[in-house]
Image (cartoon, rainbow, N blue to C red):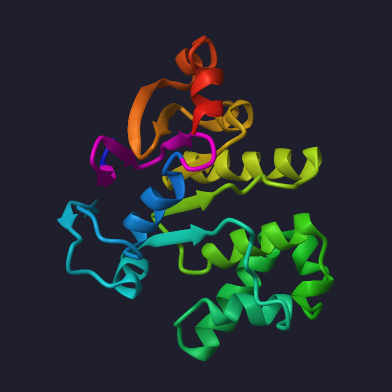
Amino acid sequence: MTILVQIGDVSVAEGEVVALLGGNGAGKTTLIETVLGFRHGTVVLFGQQAASFSVEERVSLGIGYVPAGRRVFAGLTVRENLEASSSLPAAQRRRRTDEVLAQFPMLGERPDARAWLLSGGQQQMLALARALMNRPRVLLLDEPTLGLAPLVVADLLQRLAVMAAEGTAVLLAEQRAGLALRVAGRAIVLSRGRMVLAGSARELANDPRLADLMAGG
């Protein structure tokens, strides 16, 4: 598999879901923000040193991002949220918006609804749909299951598995280790910004150290 993202000991390859685990303060968000360019750090993206790349350049290269807390544009409609995340020419942007809405029936049924009127699960799907507008090769997700109902979580994880099967590299930062390990092939546990445990999802799911490390931050 081709490695698309490398930061320190953390790597994500094409078609792979990697779970980034750890409690509050473990460094998961910091690592994701470093990949995005919000923080300084040595990152290799698609085989290139990314030190000089702006956030916009990283996105244009193929990085998609679903932030913690959803952060959709509350006053905009579903369609407007999607269109605002794309730099395509107007006609192409409309076509791409229609394509993405077709992938998310719960959003496609309410394209003109203001985002603040959506349920938490619908807002999370909107955040994911927005990240997919530019057809990312790498998808970064920060605590995407937080506060979601079990059925919505199951739908989200299934979507991530399908995306990985189609070749997208997925880095999934989660505190809910059990959920993340269901969909991930590999997992990495951080503590105070350092990798303290790594292995296959199956290995970590059965590792007695995992619970203590998740609680320790």
Direction from residue 7 to residue 65 in the image, left or right: right
Q: Residue 166: x and y, percent?
A: 47, 44
> Residue 168 versus residue 130: which sits nearer the camera?
130
Q: Is residue 215 above or below residue 136?
A: above
Is residue 57 in view from this perspective? yes
Q: Residue at x 45, y 82 (%)?
A: 88
**Which quadrant of the view contains residue 94?**
bottom right
Q: Residue at x 23, y 52 (%)?
A: 43
Q: Residue furthest bottom?
A: 90
**Which quadrant of the view contains residue 187?**
top left
Q: Is residue 161 above or below residue 131?
A: above
Q: Residue at x 58, y 29 (%)?
A: 177
Q: Residue 193: x and y, percent?
A: 35, 40
Direction from residue 157 to residue 114 in the image, left or right: right
> Residue 147 versus residue 90: which sits nearer the camera?
147
Residue 149 in the magenta stretch? The answer is no
Q: Which residues are magenta?
A: 3-25
**Label tally:** 0
**Which quadrant of the view contains residue 34?**
bottom left
Q: Is residue 123 above or below residue 177?
A: below
Q: Is residue 168 above or below residue 212?
A: below
Q: Residue at x 68, y 46 (%)?
A: 146
